Amino acid sequence: MTTAAPETLTDRLTGQHVTLWPYARGCYPRQTLATLWQMVEQEGGADRIFHAQQAPRETPTPTRGDLVSFVRYFEPEPAGSRLLLMVQSRADDQLAGLFWFDDIVLGHRASANVFYRRRYWGEAAREASRLACRYGFEHLGYRTIWAMTPWPLAVSHAEAIGFERVAVLPGYCLLEETPADLVVLRLEREGFDAG
C-alpha cells in the first residue's frame, strides 16, 4: 500500500496558472520590494493601491505611492500586521501581481487586497486570489476575509471568486478629487470553494 506524500506549503500555494510566494524580509534578494514597486509603477497601479493616502499638494513631484511609501507599506510596524504574497505566473515565470492581507486578527479575520498586471487579469488572477484566500482560511485560520474597494473591476473580481457585497458607503472615497462609493465585501470560510 502506498500513501501520498503530505502536501507542502508550496503545493498549497501552487495552482495551474500561478504560484504564490509569501514575502518575508531576509528570505528574498534585498531589492525585492523595489522590484515589486517597479512592476506596480510600470502598470500605473500606485494610485490604485495608495488611493486612500492624501499626498501633500505642495510637493513638485507626487509622493503618494513612491518607493518610500511602498516599502513602508509592505514592511509595516508592528511586523506581522500585513502579509504579502507575491504572485508568479507558471507559464512564463514572471511576476503576475500581488495579493496581501492586512487588518489581520489571526484565527478571526483579515482584509484582502490585490494588484495584478493587466496581462494576467482573468483566470490567472482569479486562481491567485482563490489560492490566497484558501491559505488564509486553512493555514492562518481566518473565519472571514473582507475586501473594501472603490474600483468596479475589483468588485467584479472579488465577486467572481465568491465574495458577497455587504455594504456600500456612498461617497466615502475621494478619487482624483471626486467622491466615489466604497464597496464592502465578505468571503466566509464556510462554503468557500477554492476550485
Image (cartoon, helix red, strand yellow):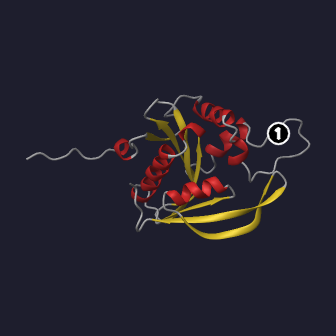
Which residue lies most toward the bottom here? 166
Res. 102 in view: no
**Label 1 is placed on what type of residue?**
Pro
Query: Could you tell me which residue is drawn at 51 percent across and 31 percent down?
Result: 94
Q: Nearer the viewer, residue 181 or 22?
A: 181
Name the quadrant containing residue 141.
Answer: bottom left
Q: Position of residue 84 (x, y in %)?
A: 54, 45
- Report which quarter residue 170 is drawn in: bottom right
- Disc 1 marks which residue? 62
- In this picture, is 2 found above or below 157? above
- Residue 70: in sight, yes or no? yes
Q: Note whether 138 is above or below 115 in the view shown.
A: below
Residue 64 position (above or below residue 130)? above
Instruction: Name the residue rendered at 80%, 40% in the picture.
Output: 63
Q: State the image coordinates of residue 109 (x, y, percent, origin top left).
A: 52, 64
Q: Residue at x 46, y 62 (%)?
A: 142
